[in-house]
Each structure stands twice: as C-alpha cells, then as structure tokens.
Amino acid sequence: MTENRHEKLGLSDEQVLDMYRTMLLARRIDERMWLLNRAGKIPFVISCQGQEAAQVGAAFALDRNKDYALPYYRDMGVVLAFGMTAKELMLSGFAKAEDPNSGGRQMPGHFGQKKNRIVTGSSPVTTQVPHAVGIALAGKMEEKDFVSLVTFGEGSSNQGDFHEGANFAGVHKLPVIFMVENNKYAISVPVSKQLACEKVSDRAQGYGMPGITVDGNDPLAVYEAVKQAADRGRQGEGPSLIEAVSYRLTAHSSDDDDRTYREKEEVEAARQEDSIHTFSAYLRELGILTEEKEQEMQDEIMKLVNEATDYAENAAYAEPETIFNYVYAE
Amino acid sequence: MAQMTMIQAITDALRTELKNDENVLVYGEDVGKNGGVFRATEGLQDEFGEDRVFDTPLAESGIGGISIGLALQGFRPVPEIQFFGFVYEAMDAINGQMARMRYRSGGTKAQPITIRSPFGGGVHTPELHADSLEGLIAQQPGMKVVIPSSPYDAKGLLISSIRDNDPVVFLEHMKLYRSFREEVPEEEYTIDLGKAEVKREGADVTLVAYGAMVHSSLKAAEELEKNGVSAEVIDLRTVMPIDMDTILESVKKTNRVVVVQEAQRQAGVAAHIIAEIQERAILHLEAPVLRVTAPDTVYAFSQAEEVWLPNYNDIIERVNQVVNF
Ligand SMILES: Cc1ncc(C[n+]2csc(CCOP(=O)(O)OP(=O)(O)O)c2C)c(N)n1
Ligand SMILES: [Mg+2]
C-alpha cells in the first residue's frame, strides 16, 4: 500500500494533481522548444527537464499571490506555477515582441513578469541572489509578510553573489529561501570539481541559517522543506538554504553536446528516477490519477502547447527601432 | 603550413606555449574535459594533464584572483573567461589588482597573465554575450588589450601575449572564430604587441579598425575603390597601448580619418584615438575625424542586431562625408 504523503502535508488531491499537471506542462513545453530549436525556428533552449519536481514543489509551498520568485534559467516549473502561461513562454522562446519576460531582449529562460512578482534576472549566474535579499529586506522594513524564493544551480553557489547574499540575509534574519537545484553538473563540470563540501546545504552553517538537502525528484519533499522555510521566514526567524538534488536530463543547452563529458548510461540511470514518472506512479497508486484522467491531462496540455506554439510563431518581432527605448527614463 | 580557422590557431598557440614553458597554465570554466564551450582548449587536457589544463569552479572573481597568486609565484597563467560579458565578476582582480601590482611593488613583482575571452556581436547572442567591453580594460593603466582579426594574427599575438610580462586581456571575436581559414605556420612565431598593421594601402582616407570591423573596413575600402576613393585600412591588433605612430604616419599621407569600432560610441577606444590624432596631427587634417560605432544603447536583441551593429555601408557613408568635407 502506498502511503498518502500529501495529506499529511495539508495538500488536497486537487492540489497534487495541479502540481503534477504543472510539472507535465513544463516538460511538454520544454520538449517542444527542443523540437523547434532543432527545426531552426527558435534560437536557443535551456532546459528544465529533470528539475520540474523541485521547481513546482517549491512554488506550490509559497503564497503565489504575495511571495516573490527570483528564478534562474531552468525554472519553467516555478514561473508556470507563479502564473506565466505556456503562450508567454513560447513568445519568449521565439523572442517575439509580446514576450512578457523581456520582449525578446534577453535569452529564453531569463524569466521576469512584474504582475506575477517574478523578478527578472540576467545572464551572469547568481546575480539574482542578492536581489532576492534586497527585496526581502525591503519587505521587512515595510512590515510586509512576503518571502522571496531565489533559485540557482550548485555550480552557481560558488559565486561571491551567493555568499554575500546569504550572509546578509543571515545577519539581518531576512525571509529569503535560497534553493539550490543541484543537477550534478555545471555545463561539463561535475559537482566534485565545484565544491569541497559534501552537500551544498552544508554552506548554510556559515551564514547562520538551517540547511537541508532533499530529493529534488520528489515534489512533496521539496514542498515540505520550502513550506517550513517560508513559515520560518514569515515568523521573522530568517533565511533557509534548501538543496534539491536531481539530475540534468538534457545537455546544458541547445549549444552543448554532453557526450563529450558524461556517459550515456549515467543519463539513462537518472531517467529511471525522472519525477514525471515517479510522481505519476504515486498518484496512480493512490487512485488519484487514472489512465483515463492522465490521457485527458496530456491531451489538454498538448492542445495548450500547440496553441502556444502557433500563436508565438506567428507573432511579431519587436521593431528594430525599439532598441533605443528603455535605456533611460523617457 | 596549414589552413586554420581562428579558433584552431588559438588552440595551436596555447599548445605551443604549453609545450615551450612549463609555467604556462590554462584554466577556466569547462576548459578541461570539455575543451571549452567554443572548443578553444580541445585536447589540451589530454595532452598536458590535469595539473596544467583544468576546470575551475564557477566563479570569475576567483579565477582572476588565483591568477594573481599564481603569477606572483612565477607561473604564467592563461585563464579563460567564458564570455567577456562575465568579466564584471572579475573586474576588481583585473583592473584593481593585477594591473597595479608592478606599480605597487615598486617594479619588483610582475603579472604575466593572459586572460582569454570570446566577445563580439553578429552571432545572435544577446547582451552580455556579445558586448564589446574592451574599453573598460583599455582605460586601466597597467593592462594591455589585444584583439586579433585573423587566424594568423591570433596565433602570433597570443604567443606574444603569453610571453609578455604584463597582464593582457586577449579578446577573441566570436564571429571570426570560424568565419574563414587562412595559412598559419605550424611552427611558432610572434607578432609584437602594440604594433598595428596596415592591411591595405590607400591615399585618400585612413580607416582605423580592430576585430571584426577590420573586415567591414576592408569591404568598404573595396567598394570605395570602385568610386575612385582610395582607403588605407589599419588593423590596430593591440587596442591598448595604441600604435599611434602607424596611425599618424597614415594620417600625414591621407589627411582624412574614420575610426571604426563595434562598441558603442561612448565605449571602445575610438574617442581616445581621435583625441590623440587631433592633438598630434591637426595641421595634417583636411576634415574632422569621424567615427563609425554602435549607438549608445544596450546591445541589441537578435532581430535588431544587424541594424545596431556598424557595417560597411555605415563606413562608406562616413568616408564620403570626410572626403567631401
Ligand atoms: C557569471 C557567469 N559565468 C559563466 C556563465 C556561463 N554559464 C552559464 S550556465 C553555467 C553553468 C551553471 O551551472 P549550475 O550553476 O550548476 O546550473 P545548471 O545550469 O546546472 O542548472 C555557466 C558556466 C554565466 N552565465 N555567468
Ligand atoms: Mg548544475
């Protein structure tokens, strides 16, 4: 008998189905983007595949009407959960004018959407970390009770921006959730060549905050950890560091060939733990998801992805003259 | 002799110096097993071992800082910054530290470091993956900045940079990495830093350019020739220090100058060159010295890239202005 774990976390059947649906949507959009890239239609893809559980689990643990997300380029699951749509993500993939992230000014994966409190980042990794700390500091000063979630890769946890941001948040007991999505590689460089500590979460100790490592393929484990961190943050107890361990199932990006630095067998083994399958199995075993329901869900998602693709493909590019806009206040 | 692309010539130069001098070290993000995201260091780890060619953790200020320590201990580091837009993370190590070591130590300590990095536009990479930031480094006394425009030059200049006893930022234009091949000697050779090359002789106007803009300038010169305007094209090769002697000699002959750079008007080194020309050769000028640059905005998004980047038509237009002044 499979134990019902979500009920204990206060999650309803509808909520876990919604989590699964969001994970699946992220996966399908991502897969479509690769196809479009290989067909020469979109310039660049950087994937969420393998990290959807961590992303969706984390976002669902927050108050998505109030909290802030400072995602990194793989976080399609986070931004979908925060309210960005498939169509908007496709517009960004095609770099069209209507893309809410940046109107095609940044690469796909540089998420930002003001109305959903998704704070735009930029290409240099980890720069979003101190931004999240500043936002949390502002919230504390203005006595607002939101928390800010900032995510980044394990390789990126070596940047000064992580250490400076974490230290500041620790000193000022700010409501920041630092979530490392440890997918075991930074482009070609494995964790063993990035960190001397065993776990990225060990780093929390240096900044006076709790640090935990959870299974990043288990959305419920991530949900639980982030929920606790959010509660801590809201109660004025300060920041937390969460490391969600999974695996990068694709090459680093559409410009990378991972065959030069990792074995096919390793990728295949990781596929066995793919959260899309394991979470689906969990829901089926509990009878929450049936074959029929899943098919329905798949069909509905494919319809969304198709519509989003068609719309974005036919949408207009930004006019070249708009390069002069937004450099300074008008 | 072999036909090489610029990226092959760069790998060849690195291999040459790794062989020549055991103090040469090559490192950076993904440069080891992966051979670099642009494959500039392909095969070097296999050939020279993990002690001399290695991956660093993902942290540029650390890459900059450890280079300083290694250089102080007599090594000749050749670190890579994966894209030059990420140099901001290492700016203090470069402009604040390595550039000033010789001065601070009363001439007792050298920083023979060569920081290699891809940069430049026209390959549909967005801002921070395409910016021309050479001006930031060129404004720092103590730093040298080298920008090759061809495979032949890339090899000779990189070897010279590695052998140079001061810190050099060696910028590799991404558009030129694989855009053409040329004859590159397999044996070692050097090209002096701080020496420009007259790429094409002309009598009516001097075009001063560097990096990818050398090719746009040469193309403009060809077109201008058809209209009876003879343009001399100078490739700076080293953008700091600037070879003013070669520029002034040309100015004295042509009396008209257009400076061409891919960087924005407020960036790069064009303004500096123009100031030098008017200070040192104003009586030789028949027209104001004009510039061809990108506009003063953030690097353009893909669809506007071709509009944003200077091209040979822009150069022709400016040349016609100085010729008809
Ligand atoms: C400051 C900076 N340096 C280098 C890069 C190039 N780069 C982009 S992603 C990446 C690897 C990131 O690895 P990790 O933090 O583990 O995140 P992952 O991509 O694995 O999710 C690198 C080196 C960058 N974007 N920014
Ligand atoms: Mg990683």
Image: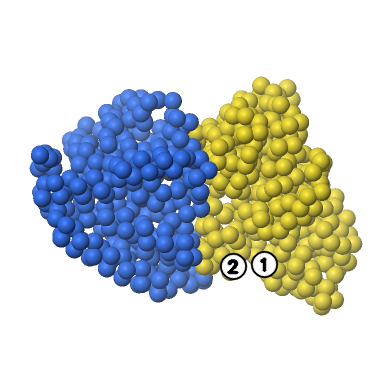
How dense is the environment of label 2, judged by Cα within 10 Å: few (below 14), some, or many (20 and up)?
some
In contact (CB < 8 Å): disc 1 and disc 2: yes
Which chain is indicated by disc 1?
B
Q: What element carries label 2?
A: helix
Report which quarter residue A247 is drawn in. Answer: top left
Chain B colour in the picture: yellow
> Is residue B246 found left or right of B87 in the rendered image?
right
Q: Residue at x 85, y 76 (%)?
A: B228
Shown colour of chain A: blue
User: Is label 2 within 8 A of ligand 1 (CB to nearest ligand atom)?
Assistant: no
- Residue A81 percent location from the top left of the image: 25, 54
Where's residue B131, x and y in %? 58, 54
Can the viewer see residue B279?
A: no
Residue B24 to residue B122: above or below: above
Residue labelled with disc 2: B306
Please name the amino acid that badge 1 sits on. Asn
Q: Where is residue A47 in the image (x, y as percent from the top left)?
A: 39, 51
Q: Is residue B218 left or right of residue A213?
A: right
Give the quarter of the image for residue B96: top right
**Residue ID at (64%, 57%):** B175
Q: Quadrant of the C terminus of chain A?
A: bottom left
The answer to whether residue A87 is seen in the rendering is: yes
Residue bearing mark 1: B311
x 73%, y 56%: residue: B181
